[in-house]
Amino acid sequence: MGSAVTYSNDAKERVLGVSHDTLLAHGAVSEETAREMALGAIRAYRSDYSVAVTGIAGPGGATDTKPVGLVYIAVADGPRTVVARNIFKGDRASVRSQTVSEALSMLKDMVEGRL
């Protein structure tokens, strides 16, 4: 139905409807933000399912509490939203590849009723 690349907090708010308060309280890389992104995608695209990803692929951007490789993946079907916290290892390309693989696996599990 559609897709959105929302690196900035402003885009997360405008395009996916992530709450400004959520971003202030928890940050862009958080379970709460991933959940709101997934639900926002369902609303924006009127889709049956959505996948949202927010994380730090590196090489920079890490903090003491949010290391490189930290990725939150959310899948939603409207009534249900499941968010997984992941710490992937490797360089930027590896983190991104692992993220895609896990996101698709989670979506498949949700569609097939295993999640």
Image (cartoon, rainbow, N blue to C red):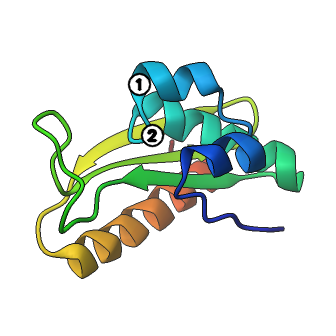
Identify the image quadrant of the N terminus: bottom right
Q: What label sits on residue 28 in the rendered view?
A: 2
Q: Residue visible at 44% across and 18% down?
A: 25
Q: Would residue 5 be found to the left or right of residue 114 on screen?
A: right
Residue sitting farthest toward the bottom: 93
Q: Residue 76 at what x, y percent from top left?
A: 64, 43
Q: What label sits on residue 109 in the rendered view?
A: none
Q: Is residue 76 visible?
A: no
Q: Residue 114 at what x, y percent from top left?
A: 51, 46
Residue at disc 1, secondary structure: helix
Residue sitting farthest toward the right: 46
Q: Residue 100 at what x, y percent from top left?
A: 42, 70
Residues at badges 2 and 1 in contact (C-beta under 8 Å)?
A: no
Q: Would residue 71 be found to the left or right of residue 87 on screen?
A: right
Residue 91, above or below 20: below
Amino acid at the residue labelled 2: Ala
Q: Residue visible at 15% across and 75% down?
A: 91
| Residue wearing tag 1 | 26
